[in-house]
Image (cartoon, rainbow, N blue to C red):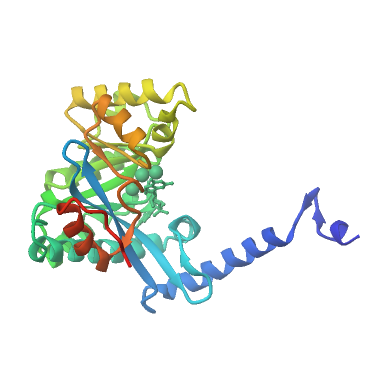
């Protein structure tokens, strides 16, 4: 009988769905104040050159340290922020903080002067009229060189408004900023059109890297084709989600230049970056404890 009571139009709401909905509402109402309360933090994941295993930079990944739910991953609040438009403000916070932090490492950590910082942009940010000014201001405030900055966008974000995206990306690129297509291979954009975007890097989606273990017969030919195409277009390639030496060997054979994944490091809080770099330079595994 209790089950019947929870049935609406054939959908049974169980305990966990109820909790999810509750969490989502909570997140929607608390998120606008999260930045002011100092609950947002950036974690950083290294990107390495496969040849030589040397770090080339870090990707900044947003987390919310929620008083009730602990560390909330972006998948649980970025979509909410995207819906309400709050992402534009959050995105500005991310840019300011990531670029300032990265410039501090470049200036202060031995051997870090050439490191780059990658920041994710959502669809709504890409369509926002203030984006170019926001990026310029964040770079100015951080005192960071545009060539050390990489912005990551997805194919689907670009597709929301192709003309506008093209104009914005062209302006950002002409400032000297690098542009990556994130989760490459999961969207539906045509290649002819992608090749016209002023991007500098393709980030091969984790799903293809995962399939390199033989579980997906299409993974290898896809990674090979993307890498060949990128080479012909003069673009860099980053493999996302590299979790094993097997993945890495496979990617090396296929000619992929750069990689990112748990094999080297999970995204880490900012204070762990300098020690991680030191351990990495010494060829030692990093122990965060
Ligand atoms: P993304 O940009 O594709 O980021 C890569 C995601 O893969 C990150 O998840 C990272 O922790 C995860 N990852 C990295 N290496 C591995 C691996 O070896 N194995 C596995 N299983 N996962 C790996 P995260 O941090 O949860 O971020 C998820 C997504 O949230 C990001 O995907 C990005 O789309 C979005 N996001 C994160 N931070 C921001 C931000 O500041 N602004 C915007 N607009 N979006 C963000
Ligand atoms: Mg990304
Ligand atoms: Mg990605
Ligand atoms: Mg991804």
Q: Mark yes or no: residue 6 visible.
A: yes
Q: Which image quarter: residue 224?
A: top left
Q: Is residue 106 left or right of residue 207?
A: left
Q: Which image quarter: residue 247?
A: top left
Q: Position of residue 267 (x, y in %)?
A: 34, 56
**Vertical relation: 64 (above or below) 236:** below
Foreground of the two, 232 or 260: 260
Foreground of the two, 245 or 222: 245
Foreground of the two, 138 or 264: 264
User: How many numbered circles does the render carry?
Assistant: 0
Q: Which image quarter: residue 49?
A: top left
User: On the rendered image, what quadrant is the C terminus found in?
Assistant: bottom left
Instruction: Report the image quarter containing ligand 3.
Output: top left
**Vertical relation: 218 (above or below) 128:** above
Q: Residue furthest bottom?
A: 37
Q: Is residue 166 left or right of residue 71?
A: left
**Vertical relation: 178 (above or below) 132:** above
């Amino acid at each position: 009988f209790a089950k019947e009571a929870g049935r609406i139009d054939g959908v049974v709401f169980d305990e966990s769905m109820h909790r999810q909905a509750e969490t989502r509402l909570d997140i929607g109402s608390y998120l606008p104040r999260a930045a002011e309360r100092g609950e947002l933090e950036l974690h950083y994941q290294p990107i390495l050159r496969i040849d030589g295993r040397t770090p080339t930079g870090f990707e900044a990944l947003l987390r919310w340290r929620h008083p009730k739910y602990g560390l909330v991953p972006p998948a649980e609040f970025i979509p909410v922020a995207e819906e309400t438009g709050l992402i534009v403000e959050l995105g500005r916070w991310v840019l300011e903080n990531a670029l300032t932090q990265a410039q501090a490492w470049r200036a202060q950590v031995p051997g870090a002067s050439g490191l780059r910082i990658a920041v994710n942009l959502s669809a709504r940010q890409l369509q926002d009229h203030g984006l170019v000014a926001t990026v310029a201001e964040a770079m100015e405030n951080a005192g960071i060189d545009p060539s050390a900055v990489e912005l990551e966008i997805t194919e689907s974000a670009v597709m929301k408004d192709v003309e506008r995206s093209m104009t914005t990306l062209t302006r950002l690129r002409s400032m000297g900023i690098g542009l990556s297509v994130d989760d490459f291979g999961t969207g539906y954009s045509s290649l002819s059109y992608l090749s016209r975007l002023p991007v500098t890097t393709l980030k091969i989606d984790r799903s293809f890297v995962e399939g390199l273990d033989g579980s997906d017969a299409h993974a290898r030919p896809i990674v090979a084709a993307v890498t060949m195409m990128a080479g012909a277009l003069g673009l860099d390639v980053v493999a996302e989600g590299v979790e094993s030496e097997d993945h890495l060997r496979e990617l090396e054979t296929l000619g992929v230049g750069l990689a990112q994944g748990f094999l080297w490091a999970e995204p880490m809080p900012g204070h762990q970056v300098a020690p991680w770099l030191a351990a990495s330079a010494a060829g030692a595994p990093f122990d965060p404890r």
